[in-house]
Amino acid sequence: MSSIFKSIASAFRDLVRFKIAWIIIWPVLAATLFWSVIGYLFGDSFTELIYLAFGEMGVGEWLKNVEPAWIATSIQNLIHIIVFIPLVIMTTLIITTIFIMPALIKLVAKRNYPELKRENGGSISGSIVNAVLATGVFILIWVVSLPLWTFGVGVFIPFIAAAFMNQQLFRYDALSEHANKREIKEICASNRYSLWGLGLLTGMLQFVPVLNLLAPIFTALAFIHFGLDQLQLLRTNNEKRNDAVVALEE
């Protein structure tokens, strides 16, 4: 647990540094603009899909006939928001991973882990596959859980989805330049719960107005610090273990 809070503290420290100030806002603005345009162009089609989905759940006729009419409109607008927000979050995180993550890794590694050897165990194809998997499961969680919103249970879904998206999307890329393939697998396996915890804590920031503008970069920084710190610890322990084996053989 201490490694999680250490990573978060390091991410906050880096967040205020001038070198990364220019990359904080633009991914959120780009994602918001993209989905706003899509919503404007295809809003009517999306509304039809909403009514179709509610029809399958057996509440479509009720929604059409509910009085006064503003209640139905409010429900429809709420659903638009419920769908719009995760799409913006997902797109922002993907933009951050593809375009900004390498620069952040370089800054963090140069300042905090200058002696950490680069093994380049990750690859572009691996990052793409990982991003596609993370996006697919993220969308599936939201689609499958939509009926739960009618019972109030859906309030927990955004946090679960954000935690999954963050840990799945960033853990691989945070290690891809410095760790080899075996180290990536070992760190992800041995820190499974910590990665989910870090994903949940950073994911909560995505739902806080104003602060959510900082969330993508903050999340990336937190996972970079966590990953590189765990990699450094793993290699240190392996070196000690190897030294002990050599000493015993002598």
Image (cartoon, rainbow, N blue to C red):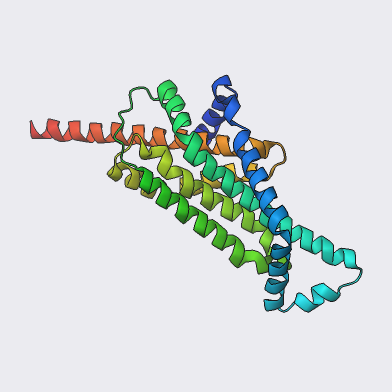
Image point (65%, 38%), residue name: 29
Could one spot residue 190 in this view of the protein? no
Residue 219 at what x, y percent from top left? 54, 38
Q: Position of residue 134 (x, y in %)?
A: 48, 53
Q: Quadrant of residue 245?
A: top left
Front one among 119 and 250: 119
* Quadrant location of the C terminus in the rendered image: top left
Side of 75 relative to 197 (left or right): right
Q: Is residue 58 left or right of residue 199?
A: right
The residue at the far left in this view is 250
Residue appearing at x 29%, y 40% in the figure: 180
Identify which residue, 113 or 19, lies in the foreground: 19
Judge left or right: residue 241 versus residue 22.
Answer: left
In the image as oriented, which residue stretches furthest toward the front? 41
Quarter of image, res 172? top left
| Image x and y of residue 59, in percent | 75, 76
**Image location of residue 142, percent across then percent down:** 60, 61
Identify which residue is drawn at 34% across, 42% down.
122
Residue at x 75% of width, y 76% of height: 60
Does residue 223 appear in this view? Answer: yes
| 40 in relation to 204, above or below | below
- Total label count? 0
Which residue reaches farthest right?
Answer: 68
